[in-house]
């Protein structure tokens, strides 16, 4: 299976990060496109992301997926704020296309905050209208929007089941799923069951572990997720994408160097996908 990772655990290598990524056996990168929310013009950010693409190409790494911008705490409660947000999203999709990135991952809007949607029907409609309006930009740029399941226990579009209900209501080839294993675990749901539920609608993934109590992005085999069951489910549905990590170090091999941690992490991955 193709192996990939988020860049957080490689950023310490600076301009060498993609070369080191390749050396450790990860051929596919998950980057974050959020500069359009951090005061940069689209031109400034496109220059930045094209430099990332150049570094990746030189290392022989493919930028497979990109995470779109998300501000925290979320507040998209008015039409004006959502219009501003939509423009940022369109800019981010165009940036993904510039670096030949086919899959663009995004969270749902949370207009009433992350802990309650207050009105389930209105929450659904706001998201439905928002993402339907983004689809023309995605199609024009050859990008698939990948809607991610969430760890928030009080939002109605959080679980894999509800995320998929939303995706299937949108019903478009350019709107599919990013399955986040840690978010499943936070809700007490087996990621393997979520894979089978998603089937062909699952295009990308975020792989990480936790203890079920927090969205802590732990390395695999350090939490409670059954990774054999998860991998078996991927094989069962014929998943042909990238086994893409979204981990942080936390307490993993405390005081060890980044190189040591990466070697141990790669051994864990190899054990799961062997």
Image: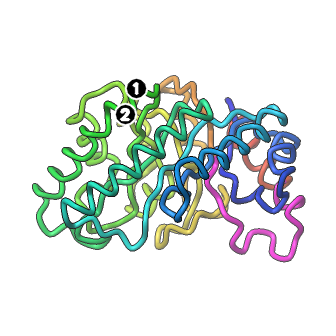
Say whether residue 139 is left or right of residue 273: left
Where is residue 83 drawn, in percent x and y? 27, 54
- Cα distance between the residues tagged 2 and 1: 5 Å
Instruction: From this view, report whether residue 233 is shown above or below residue 51.
Output: above
**Residue at horizontal 30 percent and vertical 46 percent from the top:** 163
**Residue at horizontal 68 percent and vertical 41 percent from the top:** 50
Q: Give the total of numbered labels.
A: 2
Say whether residue 265 is left or right of residue 166: right
Which secondary structure class fits the magenta region best? loop
SS assignment at label 1: helix
Displayed quadrant of residue 262? bottom right
State the mark number for residue 140.
Answer: 1
Name the one closer to the observer, 192 or 173. Answer: 173
Displayed quadrant of residue 56? top right
Are the two marked residues, 2 and 1, in contact with CB atoms closer than 8 angstroms? yes
Where is residue 106 drawn, in percent x and y? 42, 49
**Residue at horizontal 49 percent and vertical 72 percent from the top:** 214
Where is residue 229 drawn, in percent x and y? 54, 42
Instruction: From this view, report whether residue 123 is shown above or below residue 104.
Output: below
Instruction: From this view, report whether residue 161 is shown above or below residue 174.
Output: below
**Which quarter of the rendered picture does the N terminus lie within?**
top right
Would residue 252 be counted in the magenta stretch?
yes
Q: Which contiguous range is marked in magenta?
A: 245-262
Which residue is identified by label 2?
A: 137
**Which quarter of the rendered picture does the C terminus lie within?**
top right
């Amino acid at each position: 299976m193709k192996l990939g990772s988020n860049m957080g655990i490689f950023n310490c290598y600076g301009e060498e990060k993609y070369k080191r990524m390749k050396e450790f056996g990860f051929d596919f990168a998950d980057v974050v496109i959020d500069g359009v929310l951090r005061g940069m013009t689209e031109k400034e950010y496109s220059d930045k992301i094209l430099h990332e693409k150049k570094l990746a190409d030189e290392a022989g790494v493919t930028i497979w997926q990109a995470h779109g911008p998300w501000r925290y705490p979320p507040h998209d409660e008015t039409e004006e704020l959502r219009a501003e947000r939509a423009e940022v999203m369109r800019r981010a999709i165009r940036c993904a296309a510039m670096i030949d990135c086919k899959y663009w991952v995004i969270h749902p809007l949370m207009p009433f905050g992350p802990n309650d949607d207050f009105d389930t029907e209105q929450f659904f409609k706001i998201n439905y209208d928002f993402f339907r309006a983004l689809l023309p930009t995605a199609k024009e740029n050859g990008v698939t929007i990948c809607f991610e399941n969430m760890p928030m226990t009080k939002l109605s579009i959080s679980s894999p089941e509800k995320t998929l209900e939303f995706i299937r209501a949108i019903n478009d080839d350019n709107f599919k799923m990013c399955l986040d294993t840690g978010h499943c675990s936070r809700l007490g749901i087996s990621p393997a069951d979520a894979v089978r539920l998603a089937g062909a609608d699952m295009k990308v993934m975020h792989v990480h572990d936790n203890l079920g109590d927090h969205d802590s992005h732990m390395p695999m085999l350090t939490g409670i997720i059954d990774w054999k069951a998860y991998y078996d489910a991927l094989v069962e549905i014929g998943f042909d994408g990238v086994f893409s990590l979204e981990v942080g170090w936390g307490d993993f091999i405390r005081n060890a160097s980044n190189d040591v941690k990466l070697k141990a992490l790669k051994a864990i991955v190899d054990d799961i996908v062997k």
